Amino acid sequence: MSTATRLQVAPNLIASAARRVMGRCEELARVTSTPGSITRVYLSPEHARVNRLAAEWMRELGMTTRQDAAGNQIGRLAPAGAPDAPALLMGSHLDTVPDAGRFDGIVGVLMALEVVRLIRRVDAEGTASSPFPFALEVVAFSDEEGTRFGKALLGSSAVAGQWDESWWELTDADGSTLREAFREFGLDPGRVGEAARRPEQLVGYLEAHIEQGPELHRSGQALAAVSSIASARRFQLVVEGEARHAGGTPYDMRRDALLGASEATLAVERICRGEHHIVGTVGQLEAFPGAVNVVPGEAHFSLDLRGEFDDSRDHAWDEIARELDAIMGRRGLRWTAREVHSAPAVFCAPLLQDVVRAGIGGEAPTLFSRAGHDAMSIGAITEVGMLFLRNPDGISHHPDEAVAGADVAAGIRALAEAVLHLGAERR
C-alpha cells in the first residue's frame, strides 16, 4: 500500500496518547462493584459510570455521543458536510469478568479514542474534521463477557440486529431477569431493536485487543494482524450415577458420578491436545449431594470448545462424545449434554487484514484469535478487522493481566495508519 498514508505526527503525540490510555485504564479499574478487585457487569451502576466517563472522553474529541437502546456507548465524528455518511466502527467492551485485569476490552476502546484524536490532526485539505469519505465511530460495547446473565456478546448482538427474545428471561445470581435489569438501568426492553445497525450504514469494524495468549510474547513482537476469531461451542453436561454411603459401599458397587466426570475432563484435554488449533476447557465441576461421606450420585460440568474452523471443532466434539459414551458405559453411569452457546468462526476481511498489516509495517505477523470478541457479532453486518497487542506471558481474565505502554503506543500508531490506509482505499 502507498506510503502516502503514513501517519505524519510527532512521536511525542503518540507517546502522550499511550500515557493517556494507560492512565484511563487505571481510572476505569477503580469503577468496580468489588473493592480490591475489578468487577463490572452489564446494566449495573458501574456500567452506567463507565459509560458516562467514556461519553465525556468522546465529547472532548468533538464527537456526538449517545447510549443506544442496549446500553452501548457510542461516539461519532462525521465528515464535514456529510452528517449521514457511513461509519467505520472502532472499539471493544468495558465490562469485565469477576476479579478481572485492567486491559481486556478496555484498552481497545481507549485506543480507538486516541486514533480519532490523531486522525483529526491529519487532513490533506487542511480542515479540522475527518478527512475521510466515512464517519468515525467509537463504540464501547456493554456486555462482551456475559458475566451477569451467562450470555456473552449481548451488546454487540443488539447492534448486529441479532437480539433473541428468549434472552429476556435470563436471570442473574440474584434472580433478576434481563428484562427487569433493562428497566432498572433506564432502558426500554421494547426498544432494544433500535440498537441495530444496517450494513449500508457501516464501512467496517476495527478492534484493537490484547492477544490473551502468549504467541506475540514468545516471538518478541509487539503487534499482529488477526486472521480470524475462533468458532466456539459451550455445553453444560450432567453425569448421573448413584449416591451411596462412602464407607459401606465397596468399589465394585460404586457408580461414582464425580469420578466419571473427572475422567471426562481428562479425556477433553487429551482429545483437544491431539487436534490442531482446538482448545477444550472444563471451567466448572460440581458434585451432588456434596457431602463428605456420600459417593457422588450426580456431577455437573461445563465444556468450552474452540477451534479455528467449525468443522474441526465439531469433529473434536464428536470425539469427546464417543469417549464419554465409553467412560460412562464402563462405569455404569449416564450422561447428557445441553448446548448453551454456539458461534461460527469469523474471518477478518482481506482488505481490513491488509490495512492492519500495512499499519503495523514490516513483516507483520498474523494470528488467529482463540478468544471471542465483539467482532464476532459485528461480522454479521459488516466486514471486521482486528489488531492484537502483546500480552506478557499471555495472562488475561486475571489481575496480573498486563500490556506495555510502548506496545500501546505502537498499536495506536498502527491502528491510526490502518484507518488512513482504509480512507485512501475508499476515496
Image (cartoon, rainbow, N blue to C red):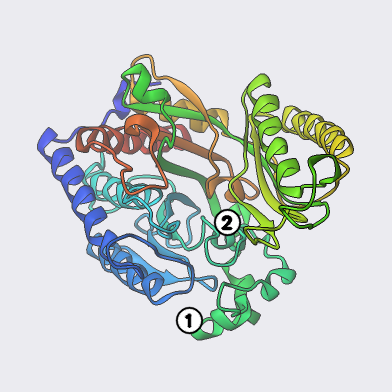
Residue neighbourhood size for the residue with mark 2, other residues' Cα within 10 Å, grouped as few (<14), some (14–19), many (≥20): many
- Give the left or right position of residue 148, taking residue 52 as reference: right
Dividing the picture into quadrants, the one containing residue 40 is bottom left
Q: Quadrant of the N terminus?
A: top left
As rendered, which of 97 and 181 lies closer to the eye?
Answer: 97
**Image spot of residue 25 (x, y percent):** 26, 54
Assign a secondary structure to mark 1.
helix
- For this view, does 192 lie left or right of residue 300? left
Depth check: give the residue in front, 184 or 318.
Answer: 318
Looking at the image, residue 137 lies above or below residue 323? below
Query: Please, is residue 312 above or below residue 69 in the view?
Result: above
The answer to which quarter of the image holds residue 121 is top left
Residue 271: percent from left, percent from top: 70, 26
Separation of disc 2 and disc 1 at Cα? Answer: 18 Å
Residue occupying image coordinates x 45% and y 28%: 225
Q: Are marks 2 and 1 in contact (CB under 8 Å)?
A: no
Quadrant location, the C terminus = top left
The answer to which quarter of the image holds residue 95 is bottom left
Sequence-wise, which precedes: disc 2 or disc 1?
A: 2
Q: Residue at x 72, y 32 (%)?
A: 313
Q: Residue at x 39, y 60 (%)?
A: 76
Where residue 287 sits in the image (x, y, percent)?
67, 55
Q: Secondary structure at mark 2?
A: loop
Query: Whole-percent x and y of residue 345?
Result: 66, 37
Q: Is residue 40 left or right of residue 102?
A: right
Identify the amino acid type marked 2.
Leu
Q: Nearer the viewer, residue 85 or 238?
A: 238
- Which residue has dot 2 on it? 153
- Amino acid type of the residue that numbered disc 1 sits on in the rendered structure: Phe
**Residue nearer the viewer, 378 or 127:** 378
Query: Local crowd at mark 1 within 10 Å, few (<14), some, or many (≥20)?
Result: some
Task: Look at mark 1 in the image and give the residue it sits on.
Answer: 185
